[in-house]
Every structure is written in C-alpha cells, then in structure tokens.
C-alpha cells in the first residue's frame, strides 16, 4: 500500500510539473535582457518614400523646427530657429545631432550689426550670463557667433528655459553699443519636441566634441 501511494504521488507530481512547463517556457521567453536598450515608444518612423529618412517641419510659437530621422541607422538631425525681435535679419539657431556635436547655440547676425571679434556678452532677461563671453566667432558661418563649449551651452539652454528673452550685446565697428534680442516663447517646447522625435529612434544626442576636434 505504501508503495502504491508513493507511485500515485509521483505520477501526480509529474503531471503537475508537465502542466507548468509551457507557462515556465513562456515566462522565460518574455523576460527582457537587462543589458538591451528599451524599445522606442510607438515604433520606428517609416521612411516609405525611399529617401531613407523621415522629415518633420513644424512651428512652435515663433520657433521653426526641422528634423530628419533615419530609422536604418537611428540617426536624428534637428534644427530649431527664431528671428530677432529688433532685427528681422538676425536669427538664433540650434543644430543637434545624434552623430556629432554641432557647436551649440548660434547667433546669426546681419552684416555690420556687431563686431564679433570683440567681446560679446549674452543676457537672459536682465541678467548677464556667465562665463562672461560665451559666444565666440564661428569660423564656418559668416557674421555668426556660437556657444561652442558643450557644458556652457547646456547651462545656457537651461537658463533660457525659464527666461522671456535672450540678447547678444557687443559693439559696432564704430564702437557704439549693439544689442540684438530674441524672444524665447516656444523655445522650451521646441527643444522638447526635438527630444521627443529623437526618442523614437532611441539614440542620445551627441553632447561632446569628438576627440581631435572633429
């Protein structure tokens, strides 16, 4: 009797274990690899026209946004820009890329508006931003100064998120004070929109210059 009882118990345990096997296998398959990056929310953009990238062109208040997303390589390139409030030929521009550092915020000014080889200060509302002269002449664009240091640019962007206006202040060729102002309404929303688009491909922005200055 004892042997029969043990046999019956063994059979019951075997059937119970067999019934658990499919569930255990399914659980094992569903367990994500902790080392793998999370999948992008909403799936990848679809470059259906054969160009290899998806374009986004939008306006956020006074800011224009243009992005290209390359699903095959998970690359994102974005530009946001706005016109000056007191010089319609001047623009503030920020280019961002997941592949290379693009030198931070740029102030594109009209020819003769300001001598950029002289010190240029940046003001956020009524406060001068420090370090005192963060905007340097940009060798790749005429009449443009750029905040080329990545950490300085990060701090300036954070400051502009809560400001109403940013201004570059310097001198004209004749030595007179020159001040070009840019409204910031929509700036934070435009930046957040580029972050949202970039997140669909899962690759972070490049926030440091490459070794060797490339």
Image (spheres, helix red, strand yellow):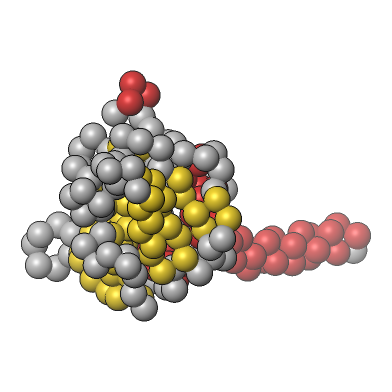
Most extreme residue toward the top is 212
Of the pair 82 and 47, the residue shown nearer to us: 82
Which residue is rendered at x = 28% and y = 43% of the image?
174
The quadrant in which residue 99 appears is top left
Which residue is rendered at x = 44% and y = 68% of the image?
184
Of the pair 117 and 173, the residue shown nearer to us: 173
Image position, residue 176 (x, y; %): 35, 48
Most extreme residue toward the bottom is 61
Most extreme residue toward the right is 2
Image position, residue 193 (x, y; %): 40, 68
Which residue is rendered at x = 76% and y = 59% of the image?
10
Locate the C terminus and report the quarter of the image it occupies: top left
Of the pair 97 and 110, the residue shown nearer to us: 110
Which residue is rendered at x = 91% and y = 60% of the image?
2
The quadrant in which residue 209 appears is top left
Side of 11 where 186 appears, left or right: left
Q: Is residue 63 visible?
A: yes
Instruction: Using the image, determine if residue 36 lies above or below residue 46.
Output: above
Instruction: Using the image, determine if residue 168 lies above or below residue 89.
Output: above
Image position, residue 15 (x, y; %): 67, 66
Image position, residue 49 (x, y; %): 9, 67
Locate the N terminus and report the quarter of the image it occupies: bottom right
Q: Is residue 197 visible?
A: no
């Amino acid at each position: 009797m004892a042997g029969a009882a043990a046999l019956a118990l063994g059979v019951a345990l075997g059937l119970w274990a067999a019934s658990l096997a499919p569930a255990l296998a399914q659980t094992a398959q569903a367990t994500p690899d902790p080392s793998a990056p999370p999948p992008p929310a909403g799936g990848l953009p679809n470059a259906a026209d054969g160009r290899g990238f998806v374009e986004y062109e939008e306006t956020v208040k006074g800011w224009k946004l243009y992005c290209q997303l390359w699903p095959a390589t998970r690359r994102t390139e974005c530009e946001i820009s706005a016109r000056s409030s007191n010089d319609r030929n001047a623009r503030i521009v920020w280019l961002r890329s997941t592949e290379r550092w693009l030198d931070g915020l740029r102030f594109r000014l009209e020819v003769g508006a300001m001598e950029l080889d002289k010190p240029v200060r940046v003001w956020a509302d009524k406060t001068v931003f420090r370090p005192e002269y963060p905007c340097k002449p940009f060798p790749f664009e005429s009449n443009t100064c750029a905040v080329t240091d990545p950490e300085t640019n990060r701090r300036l962007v954070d400051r502009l998120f809560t400001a109403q206006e940013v201004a570059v202040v310097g001198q004209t060729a004749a030595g007179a004070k020159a001040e070009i102002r840019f409204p910031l309404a929509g700036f934070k929303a435009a930046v957040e929109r580029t972050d949202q688009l970039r997140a669909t491909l899962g690759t972070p922005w490049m926030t440091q210059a490459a070794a060797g200055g490339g």
